Image (spheres, grey):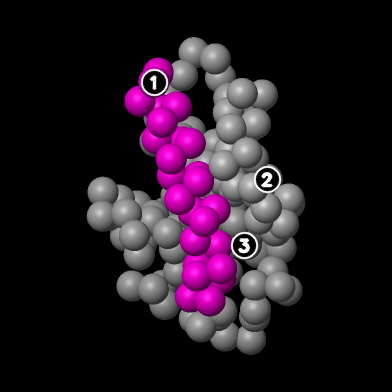
């Protein structure tokens, strides 16, 4: 699995965590991994997806505070759910994952927004993430 595909799976899981109101994060991650992930995943990819998704899910309140502090004229409760969860993933990578270069985190967030959001989202996400650099 490519790193982009891994990020895409993580995005889908944290979107699910958000949809479930952030309750029982580990259960949401486990259920997604059982029901939706490719059965041919290597053990390493499986762990990378599950562990990072759970770590992000547990930091959602903190990530939202950080996003709210940088967003000008926007708050997380007004953002589209796809955009918000892409931002959460990217901010987590920028702030807490030293293995991901900042430029890669931003570029991947923009690419995910091209796939899952409206046409205005890539510029919005890129602009907001620039405040974290």
- Residue 59 or 108: which is nearer the viewer? 59
Tell me the distance, in whole angstroms, between the alpha carbons under discs 1 and 2. 22 Å
Tell me the distance, in whole angstroms, between the alpha carbons under discs 3 and 2. 12 Å
| Residue picked out by circle 1 | 43
Please tell me whether mark 2 sits on a helix, a strand or a loop. Answer: helix
Query: Magenta segment, which residues?
Result: 42-67
Q: Residue at x 57, y 85 (%)?
A: 72
Q: Earlier in the sequence, mark 1 or mark 3?
A: 1
Q: Nearer the viewer, mark 1 or mark 3?
A: 1
Q: Is residue 52 above or below residue 120?
A: above
Disc marking residue 16: 2
Residue 81 picture location, percent across and down? 70, 58
| Residue picked out by circle 3 | 84
Q: Is residue 7 above or below residue 128?
A: above
Quarter of the picture holding the C terminus = bottom left
Tell me the distance, in whole angstroms, between the alpha carbons under discs 1 and 3. 29 Å
């Amino acid at each position: 699995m490519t790193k982009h595909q891994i990020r895409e799976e993580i995005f889908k899981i944290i979107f699910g965590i958000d949809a479930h109101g952030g309750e029982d994060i580990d259960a949401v991650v486990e259920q997604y991994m059982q029901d939706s992930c490719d059965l041919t995943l290597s053990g390493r990819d499986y762990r990378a997806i599950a562990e990072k998704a759970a770590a992000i899910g547990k930091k959602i309140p903190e990530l939202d505070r950080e996003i709210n502090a940088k967003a000008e004229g926007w708050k997380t409760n007004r953002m589209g759910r796809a955009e918000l969860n892409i931002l959460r993933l990217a901010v987590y990578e920028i702030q807490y994952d030293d293995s991901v270069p900042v430029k890669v985190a931003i570029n991947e967030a923009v690419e995910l927004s091209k796939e899952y959001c409206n046409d205005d989202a890539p510029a919005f996400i890129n602009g907001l993430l620039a405040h974290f650099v």
